[in-house]
């Protein structure tokens, strides 16, 4: 069941460094929201606050609220590991477990969650690889190492691994930046299919990609060196790219930035 994310008054810090300041937004279920903006504006930091990955960095902390439907993800009673099961993540570079087979890469999270029956594991592994549009390419070599796949296949394997544990939200941090154009289109096509089941948030430096895959786009920026990143505006992607409210957004999209 895809869930709505409500963020209010969010600040993130790395030690004494104020990384992002006072961000509030709603991320709708069964949709794709893209984060764009210059390097260092806090897009990836903000993405990592949505599943509490930010706090694994020593000295990092967050103020404000992140609500997943009616649950406060930062409430003291909430287990961060459970949050990361509910809010899955796909990283910039494909990172399959190098010593594991394709099958075991997908099944790893399931086994950690206590799924032991071979028939059930087989079923979910196949469903997840089908969901990641990878099954037909790997079904005859499930016992081979995941690291032996091409870059684009590895990234789809990582998506299969993320969706195997049935998250409600899928975060993607520049999932295509290390891929060739054909693999990039395969991932974009996959994102379009997955949004029927999940709430998807993607960080991308590729504005054409944001325009192609997302329903909403959020533009982040910084006032100057050493300043925290801020959300400048969020709106329907078509409006952000054709008629943004803020001049800074228009300047960035048209290449007049900086």
Image (cartoon, rainbow, N blue to C red):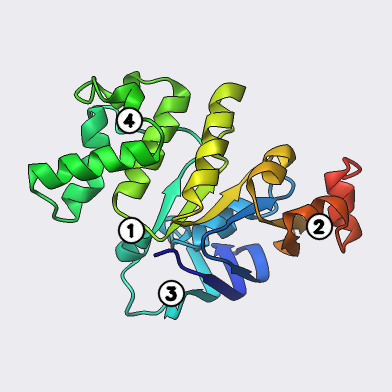
Residue 115 position, x and y percent, is 14, 52
| Pointer 2 or 4: first along the chain | 4
Residue at the spot of label 1 = 85
| Pointer 4 or 3: first along the chain | 3
Q: In which quarter of the view is residue 122 placed?
A: top left
> Is the C-beta separation of discs 1 and 2 under 8 Å?
no
Q: In which quarter of the view is residue 232 placed?
A: bottom right
- The image shows residue 61, relative to residue 258, as above or below, that is below
- The image shows residue 199, relative to residue 255, as above or below, that is below
What whole-number distance in Å separates the C-alpha atoms at marks 3 and 2?
32 Å
Residue 151 position, x and y percent, is 46, 24
Disc 3: CA contacts within 10 A as few (<14), some (14-19) or many (>=20): many
User: Looking at the image, is mark 1 or mark 4 nearer the viewer?
Assistant: 4
Nearest the viewer among 137 and 106 is 137
Residue at left 19%, top 24%?
A: 143
| Pointer 1 or 4: first along the chain | 1
Residue at the spot of label 3 = 74
**Element under disc 2:** helix
> Is the C-beta separation of discs 2 and 4 under 8 Å?
no
Disc 4: CA contacts within 10 A as few (<14), some (14-19) or many (>=20): some
Residue at left 44%, top 62%?
A: 52
Residue at the spot of label 2 = 239
Disc 1: CA contacts within 10 A as few (<14), some (14-19) or many (>=20): many
User: Looking at the image, is mark 4 or mark 3 nearer the viewer?
Assistant: 4
């Amino acid at each position: 069941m895809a869930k709505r994310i409500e963020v209010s008054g969010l600040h993130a810090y790395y030690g004494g460094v104020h990384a992002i300041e006072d961000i509030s937004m709603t991320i709708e279920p069964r949709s794709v929201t893209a984060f764009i903006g210059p390097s260092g504006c806090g897009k990836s930091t903000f993405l990592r606050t949505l599943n509490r990955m930010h706090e694994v960095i020593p000295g990092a902390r967050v103020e404000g609220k992140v609500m997943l439907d009616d649950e406060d993800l930062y409430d003291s009673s909430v287990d961060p590991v459970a949050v990361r099961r509910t809010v899955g993540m796909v990283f910039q570079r494909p990172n399959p477990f190098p010593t594991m087979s394709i099958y075991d890469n997908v099944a790893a999270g399931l086994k950690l969650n206590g799924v032991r029956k071979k028939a059930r594991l087989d079923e979910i592994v196949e469903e997840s690889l089908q969901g990641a549009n990878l099954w037909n390419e790997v079904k005859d070599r499930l016992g081979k190492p995941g690291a032996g796949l091409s870059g684009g296949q590895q990234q789809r394997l990582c998506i299969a691994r993320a969706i195997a544990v049935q998250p409600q939200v899928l975060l993607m941090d520049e999932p295509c930046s290390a891929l060739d154009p054909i693999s990039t289109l395969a991932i974009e096509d996959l994102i379009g299919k997955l949004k029927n089941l999940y709430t998807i948030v993607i960080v991308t430096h590729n504005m054409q990609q944001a325009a192609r895959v997302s329903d909403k786009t959020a533009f982040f920026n910084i006032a100057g060196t050493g300043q925290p990143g801020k959300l400048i505006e969020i709106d329907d992607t078509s409006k952000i790219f054709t008629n943004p409210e803020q001049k800074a957004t228009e300047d960035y999209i048209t290449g007049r930035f900086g």
